[in-house]
Image (cartoon, rainbow, N blue to C red):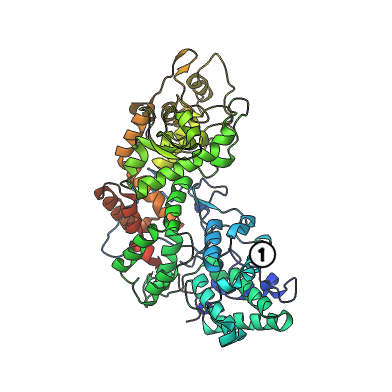
Amino acid sequence: MQANDRLTPTPTNCWGLAKAAAPTTPGSAALLLVLATNAACYHGLDGGDGGDAGLADSGATGEETNTSGGADDGSDLPGAQCDEPDVGISYLQRITRIQYKNAVADLLGVDGSAADALPADEKIGKAFDANSVAAVDMLTVEAYQSVAEELAQSAIANIDAILSCDVATVGEDECAKQMIARLGRRAYSSRLSPDDLDEFVSLYAGQKAEDGFHAGLQIAIQAILQSPRFLYRVELTPPDAGAKIAILSDDEIAQRLSFFLTHSIPDDELLSAADAGELSDAEGIQKQAARLIETPRGHAVVASFHMQWLGLTDVPTLVKSSELFPEFGTLSASAKTETEAFIDHVMFADDATLTTLLTADYSIVDDKLASLYNVELPEGTPAGEFAEVTLPNERAGILTHASFLASHAHPDQASPIKRGVFVLRNIMCAPLADPPPNVSTEPPEIDPNATVRERYEQLTSGPDCVACHSQINPVGYGFGAYDAIGRRQELELGQPVDESGSLLGTPFVGPTELAGLLAADERVDACVVSQWFRFALGRATAVEDACTVDSLLTSFRSNDKDVKQLLLGIATSDAFRLRRAEAEE
């Protein structure tokens, strides 16, 4: 069955056909935008509108579907009978910038930093990069064209790295055809159809006739990079007759696995497993998923999840008052490195559990952070090198890292509101409302005669604020001894800092006790499962996912909250292996 037999074009998330039909220069790779356009421009896989305003931060709250009004963690999805598999709607997804960078690096062996010129990614649940809502306009099409031209030129400069044949032996045209077929297989996560292969080869031949062999190869590479089958994660396997659920093909499973666990196109081993039919059952999927998690790309993806989930992606560019915090300019890069190294150590050298991420009594720091934390590096550690240290009692786990504390603060002062909101929303998935439009969100002015707690109590005591802030502030107050860059301050106005707080009614003192409460809270377990689900599938949890989410949560708890086991569970779940079929026309 051809793609055009099953998919309906729509203006949403669609390439501009006018641009494809009228390229700006002769032989422009924009001609190839017409290839698979219908395959890229379809309604959502259920026959819907291809998007969900609730998935992105574009005027909506960014929170997930929550029919009961309770915690937004998937744990209170309406009950379901689990004797038949069911899954929520999967929307057509355009690859993110980091996925694009990784994909071109793996496909062509080039630096993908040119992708920084692409439009910023959307956010799902106010945390994770996922492009499934915003329409693609002509400026975006032109950006992809420009980036593809730059990358193709770089690839040609080292063309021997991607030519798998000897031109002198098989000839230029046959060698070009083999290269196109091989690159297309990886770029599309499926074999090129004969028609698609002919289109690419014809484009190569036309450009070769004008400007030579290398020019022909370059235009073919540009075309592959602009094809919607590369830029979108297209899934076309039809369901059985009358079925509402389609079982993904091995190639489609390979694509999902790879983009989930490596943020890139499938590698040769994964494609070979797909060719051999080894991804048709849970055992084969789990084997490949376990392998991918342990690759360098897998390590980077695990770090990326946590950095996005915890709101830490902008740490190196955070702005702090140079007058109050002059050291932060050289500290910010160290703070990011610490958290990434800590995540990697917990996940791949320690027990990989959520409990350790939240409560570990150690971290991995350099001399700058050691000074900030008032700890000693192991003897002989060179300046600028990172080493494992035991943290003082007042610090525990990732929530006391300088990266977290600085990210959720203002440039000139700490913010109990930012810290409290973040813990409740992102770590507990509590359904907090956004501030009313008539309420100022500016921090209170620094008053040398008032404590942080006093200033924020005054700021949030109004009738429009108190309902939410009676939950938010007590969480944030527990971080009260940490300033805007994560430095501990024992005294405030000459008195010991008040670190007492409460987590939805449960009292604690300081972030170490808070971390213990979070690590033991079942709502946090459910939230983390939901967050990983969103990250893996690029969409919200839906009522149809209730059985999958419940099964993942049960398994997560029975495995001592082992995060890597959770990833394997997601990869072999119904939600990952199946998709809801589109409606019949």
Q: Is residue 42 visible?
A: no
Quadrant of residue 198 in the image? bottom right
Residue 480's place in the image compared with 111, above or below, is above
Q: Secondary structure at mark 1?
A: helix
Q: Residue at point 47% right, 82% down? A: 1
- Residue furthest to the front: 380
Residue 217's place in the image compared with 283, above or below, is below
Q: Position of residue 147 (x, y in %)?
A: 65, 63
Q: Is residue 6 visible?
A: yes
Residue for badge 1: 150
Q: Residue at point 57% right, 17% down? A: 447
Q: Position of residue 298 (x, y in %)?
A: 42, 57
Q: Nearer the viewer, residue 364 or 88?
A: 364
Q: Position of residue 34 (x, y in %)?
A: 63, 75
Q: Nearer the viewer, residue 252 or 136?
A: 252
Amino acid carrying mark 1 in the image? Glu
- Residue furthest to the bottom: 170
Q: Nearer the viewer, residue 180 or 443?
A: 180
Give left or right: position of 15 versus 250: right
Residue 487's place in the image compared with 10, above or below, is above
Few, some or many residues within 10 Å of mark 1 (<14, 14–19, 20+): some
Give left or right: position of 314 versus 284: right
Q: Position of residue 563 (x, y in %)?
A: 34, 50
Q: Residue at point 34% right, 63% down? A: 574
Q: How many marks?
A: 1
- Residue furthest to the right: 25
Give left or right: position of 143 versus 170: right
